[in-house]
Image: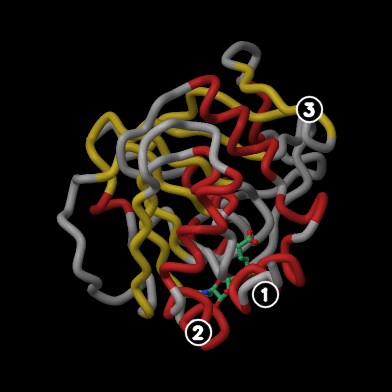
Amino acid sequence: MAPSAAEALYEKHYGGDRARRGLFDALARWCTPRRVLYPGSFLHVTASFVFPSVVYVDTDRTAKRFFASMDDVVALVARNKAYRQKPKLTFHSASYEADFDEPEGSFDLLLSLYAGFISQPCKRFLKVGGVLAANDSHGDAGLASIDPDYSLIGVVRGRGDRLRVEEDGLEASFEPKKPMTRTEASLRERGRGVAYTKSAVAYLFRRTR
Ligand SMILES: C[S@@+](CC[C@H](N)C(=O)[O-])C[C@H]1O[C@@H](n2cnc3c(N)ncnc32)[C@H](O)[C@@H]1O
């Protein structure tokens, strides 16, 4: 059977190693989030291969077109999923900085991957006690590290798809290699990550309040 247009689009952008499934697998071995929020997702539905219920948010027109064929997207996920239940996917064609229709405090896991400063506007959707998984591509992990509402509880390390969560030895995680003062304004202005002494693929924070 010929692949659907949605599958062809997914393969074009996320075929092979570009799917970065190892990150989601490592997270799923460490926690079992009931609801996952993925702002700035583009069409990275690899998250749904591992997590049964994911809400995607993006302003991109290609992402909107992809998720418009939701039956084909669900079929693609169903062929790749690692869990038994029916996958539940929702897409909001919206800015993650604006209002989108999800209850506040209803997500167990918030993903921030290569898509800007998500930790701040989307914090309200995360349960107190829920987890933010952020990389530092744009500096969002660094921003969360100086936000008193978040507490660093782990890092994801490893190579390729062989990743694992580490919960010990987190102290030097946000020690810049070159001396600098990190403030919200300076990190936002910089717009890209800082070189830290001990870098990680992703950083895990608990929302504490
Ligand atoms: C580099 S892509 C990363 C996609 C995906 N997170 C990944 O890791 O493959 C960045 C995505 O963030 C989206 N984005 C950037 N700012 C956004 C905003 N304010 N609201 C919603 N989506 C946004 C862009 O449209 C784009 O699809």
The quarter of the picture showing ligand 1: bottom right
Q: Residues within 10 Å of mark 1 (few under 14, many from 20)?
A: some
Q: Is mark 3 within 8 Å of ligand 1?
A: no
Task: Choose top left, top right, bottom left or bottom right for residue 129.
Answer: top left
Give x and y (percent) for residue 152: 48, 29
Residue located 34% across and 73% down the image: 92
Could you tell me which secondary element the residue under label 2 belongs to? helix
Q: Which residue is mark 3?
A: 162
In the figure, is residue 39 to the left or right of 26? left
Instruction: Indicate how the structure is coloured in the image.
Output: secondary structure
In the figure, is residue 85 to the left or right of 104? right
User: Do callouts 3 and 1 mark residues in contact (Cβ within 8 Å)?
Assistant: no
Please state which amino acid type lies under the numbered disc 1.
Leu
Which label was assigned to residue 9?
Answer: 1
Residue located 47% across and 45% down the image: 144
Residue located 50% across and 65% down the image: 73
The mark closer to the camera, 3 or 2, is 2
Q: Could you tell which of marks 3 and 2 lies nearer the N-terminus? A: 2
Q: Which residue is mark 2?
A: 65
